[in-house]
Amino acid sequence: MSDDLRSQFEQAYLDLGRLGHRPDNDTLLRIYALYKQGSEGDVHGEKPGFFDFVGTAKYEAWATLKGTPREVAMRDYVALVKSLGG
């Protein structure tokens, strides 16, 4: 993984915090999943319980990216944040 991609990924994370608006929930889940895949790789750990709706949604969003190379997830994350104005 190139240092340039890692620095872009880290900068996108910072830029996300400076957005002037809150993205919709589907976009937030996509952002979360791409960040987790890019930073940690494939989903791991136990799926949250049935009544943890937010935790379950996040886990399932991340699980949809299983097998996606970290570099691809990082590039997609950077592109998504840029498209939001970050």
Image (cartoon, helix red, strand yellow):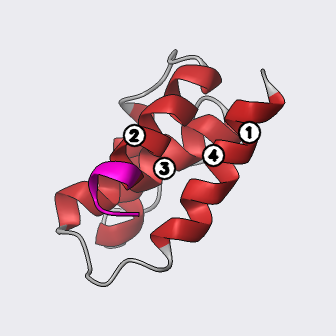
For the residues labelled 4 and 1, say whether their Cβ atoms are less than 8 Å apart: yes
The residue that label 2 is drawn on is: 79
Is tag 1's residue or tag 3's residue first in the polypeptide sequence? 1
Q: What element carries label 3?
A: loop
Residue 68, above or below 44? above
Amino acid type of the residue that numbered disc 2 sits on in the rendered structure:
Ala
> In front: mark 2 or mark 3?
2
| Mark 4 Cα shell of 10 Å, populated few (<14), some (14-19), many (≥20) | many
Residue at 68% in and 32% down: 5
- State the CA–CA distance, disc 1 to disc 2: 13 Å
Q: Quarter holding the C terminus? A: bottom left
The residue that label 1 is drawn on is: 6
Residue 40 among those drawn in magenta: no
The residue that label 4 is drawn on is: 9
- 25 horizontally vs 85: left or right: left
Amino acid type of the residue that numbered disc 3 sits on in the rendered structure:
Lys
Q: Can residue 45 be seen in this view?
A: no
The residue that label 3 is drawn on is: 47
Residue 84 among those drawn in magenta: yes
